[in-house]
Amino acid sequence: MFLPRGSQRWRRAQELEKLQEQEPATVTQGGLPVRVPGQNLIPGAAPSVTPPSSGPRNMDARRTRGMSSFQKGVSRARNNPAEAESNPEGEEQQ
């Protein structure tokens, strides 16, 4: 007899539910049930996830330059925090 895939999953879920009712649940000292990762999952219920292919990225030159300037500023502030505090607007000292 042919069963649609959805019916097979439903029957598997019913089987798992009956097994859970039969097995005594272990509890913690506080009286809470101990969780078992993946205990209630039905094989094949979720579609497999494939990561998107990462092709070459198009980086805008202006954006790259801006990030480079930001990174240099952060490095300068870390290397010389006294200079960063005395010059909060980022203006060059002469």
Image: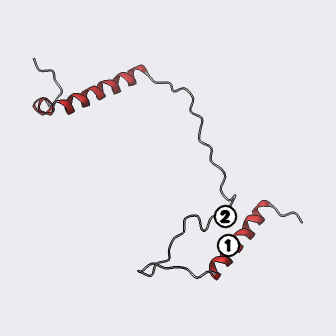
52 sits left or right of 70 in the view: right
Give coordinates of residue 62: x percent, y percent. 38, 21
Depth order, front residue of 17/66: 17
Position above or below: 49 against 27: above
2 or 1: tag closer to the N-terminus: 1
| Quarter location, residue 76 | top left
| Residue assigned mark 2 | 42
Q: Residue 93: x, y in percent? A: 11, 20
Quadrant in which the N terminus is drawn: bottom right
Q: Are marks 2 and 1 in contact (CB under 8 Å)?
A: yes
Mark 2–mark 1 Cα distance, whole angstroms, equals 8 Å
Amino acid identity at mark 1: Leu
Residue under the point 51% across and 27% down = 57
Relative to 62, residue 45 above or below:
below
Residue 16: image tag: 1
Q: Secondary structure at mark 2?
A: loop
Q: Secondary structure at mark 1?
A: helix
Residue at 52% x, 79% y is 26
Q: Is residue 87 above or below residue 24?
A: above
How many marks do you count on the picture? 2
Image coords of residue 94 (percent x, y): 10, 17
The x and y percentages for residue 35 are: 51, 70
